Amino acid sequence: MGIHWIDLTVLILYLLGITVLGVWMSRRVKTMGDYFMPRRFGSMTMIMHSFGTGTASDQAVTVASGTAQNGISGIWYQWLWLIPTPFYWLVAPIMRRFRAVTTADVLTLRFDMSVAVLFSIVGIVSMSVKIGAILKGAAAVVDSGTGGLLDSTMAIAAITILFLIYGIAGGLSAAIVTDFVQGILTIVFSFILLPFVFSAVGGMAGIRETITDPNLLSLATPKKISTFFVIMLGIQGLVGIVAQPHVMGVCGAGKTEKEGRIGFMVGNLVKRLCTVAWCLTGIAAVAWYLNQGLELDQIRNKEFADKIYGDMANTFLPRISPGLLGIFLASLLAAVMSSCDSFMISSAGLFSENIYKPLFPNKSIGHYLMVSRVTSVAVVAGGVCFAIFVPNVVEALEIWFKISPMSGIAFWMCLFWRRMTVAGAWATTVTGFATWWLSTLPRFVSFAAGLPGARPLGFIWEEGGKQSIHEPWKILFYMACATIAGIVVSFLTCPVDKQKLDRFHELIRTPVQPGEVIEEPCTLPPGVTVPDRKMLINCCGIEVPAPSATSVWGFSAGTLAGVVLVVLFWWFAKSG
C-alpha cells in the first residue's frame, strides 16, 4: 500500500482497543438513564469528555484551511467559541439542575410536547449535519495525509462502523470512557505536526520573512474576518450552545454541578489551546508552500486549502520515523469517534425519549433501547449522506453553525422571561429559519445591495463573482427577526400555566446534592426544599438570579484565561 507496516499496526491496534473498551462499558447499561445520562463521573473524566466531544478533525481542517485563505485570522473559525466559554461556567449548573435526560425534557416542562418535538427535530438534524461535517473533514485529512494511498472512504466507513458498535452497545457511558483515551490522542493530533513544520520554515521569524502581506499575520482582517465578524459569530455560538443536544450530557453526566462546571469550561479551554496549534501549523504550511515555489493564489484555493493539514502530515511524519504517521491517523480517528459517538447518542435520546416514547408509552426498557439504537444508525447514515453532498468542510461548518441558534434563541428567552409562550417559541424558531433562507435568495441579496449605505457598511460580500449577505450581517438579521417575532407573538397569545413556570424555576434554583436520586426527568427528589434566591432583575416577567460567589469567580477566571490566550497568541505572531 505504500504505508509502513508499523503505521498500519498502530492504527489497527488503536481501533480494536477503543472498540473493545467501549463495548466493555455496555455491561453497566441497565436502564434508559444508564444509557443516556449516567450521573456518576468525576471532574477529570468530564473535562476529557467535554474536550473530546467538542473537538474533532474537521475543526483542524477548517482552521488550517481558513488560515491558508485568510491568514492567522482564520483561527476565529473555532476561536469564535472563546466568547461563550466563560458562560459555560454558568450554563453547566443550570443544565444539571434541570435533572433531565434530554434538553427536550426541559422544553416539555416549560412549554409543551409540541415545542419539545420541534426542538428534537432541529437537534437531530443539527447533530446529523455535524457528524457529516466531521466525516468530511476526516476524509480530507486521511486522503491527503497518506497521499491517497489509504482509501479515505474505506477508512471513514471503518471508524463509523466501530463507533456505532460501541456507542450503540454502551451509550453515553461508553462514549465518556472512550473519550478519556481519545481526548489524549486528540491533543497528540493537534500538536504532533507543529514542531516539524515550524522547524522547516525557521519558526515564526521565518514565517514573517516569507509572508510579506501583513493582513495574513493579523488577528482581524479589514474584509472577511473583521472584529464585527468575530463578535457576531461569538454571539451566535453562545445562543446556539444551549440548543446543541449533546450539551445536556456534557453538563449533566457528572456527579454534581461542580463536575459539570469544571468539565464544560476547562475542557473547552483545552480545545482553544489546540486551536492555536492548528492555526500555527496552517500559517507555517503557507510559508513552506511559498518556499517550494507555489503562488499564494494556489494555496488559497478552497480545495487545496482543505488538504493542507493532512498534506503536512504526509510530507513530514514518515521522514522522521515509522509509526508517527500511524499515531497521527489514530489520533485523527480518535478525534472523529470521540465527537460522533456523543452526537449520535444525544440524537437517539431526543427521538426515543421525546418523540417515540410519548407516542408508544408503557413499553419495556429493552424495546426503547432497541429504538434508540436503530435511531443512532439512522442519524449517522444522515450524516454520511450530508458528507457526500456538501462541497467542502468550511461550508459544512457554516451550515451547522446556523441550525442550533434557531432553537437556542427560544431557550434563552424562556430561561429568563416568564411571558414566553408556546406560540412564541414556535414563532422564534420558524422565523429564524425563514429569515436565514430569505437571506440566501439572490433577489433578496440584490435588494439588500441596493439599500442606502449597504456598501459602506459591508452588507454585501463578493467572492468568486457572486454576491451574498456578509456573514455577520446575516447572523444579526435572522437573530433579530427571530427574537422580535418571539416577543410579539408571546404578548399576543396565552401565557404558560403558572404551576408549570413555578416548577421550571424551582428546578433552576435548587442545587444538586451529592448522591441525589432522580426518579423522573425534571423533578426534584422527595423531601428537597426549594431555597430562596436573590434576584438581580425581577421586573415585567424577567427573572435574572443574582450570581453566587462561585459563579462570579469561575466566570472571571474563564474570561481571564481567554484574554491571556488571545494576547499571548497575538504577541507570538508579532514577535515570537
Image: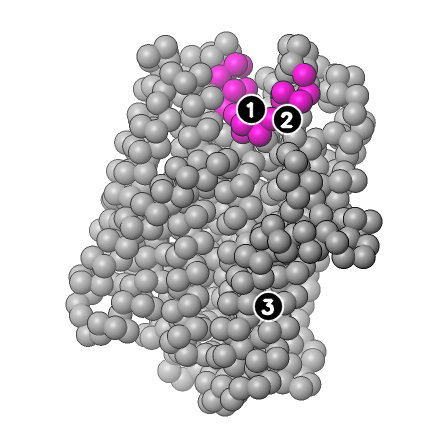
Kindly state the secondary structure of the residue where label 1 is placed.
helix
Which residue is label 2 attached to? 300
Q: What stretch is highlighted in magenta?
A: 295-317
Which residue is label 3 attached to? 482
Name the quadrant containing residue 447. Answer: bottom right
Q: In which quarter of the image is the N terminus?
A: top left
- The answer to whether residue 85 is seen in the rendering is no
Front residue of 143 and 262: 143
Q: Disc 1 marks which amino acid?
A: Phe
Can residue 316 be found in the magenta stretch?
yes
User: Answer yes or no: do the residues labelled 1 and 2 have beta carbons within 8 Å?
Assistant: yes
Tell me residue 171's x, y (percent): 30, 52
Q: Residue at x 50, y 9 (%)?
A: 319
Tell me residue 537's x, y (percent): 69, 80
Q: Which residue is drawn at 20% across and 57% down?
A: 370
Q: Find the distance from the CA under tag 1 to the CA under tag 2.
A: 7 Å
Q: Disc 2 marks which amino acid?
A: Arg
Front residue of 33 and 347: 347
Which residue is label 1 attached to? 304
Kindly state the secondary structure of the residue where label 3 is placed.
helix
Kindly state the secondary structure of the residue where label 2 is placed.
helix
Q: N-terminal of the two: label 1 or label 3?
A: 1
Q: Which residue is drawn at 36% across and 20% down?
A: 150
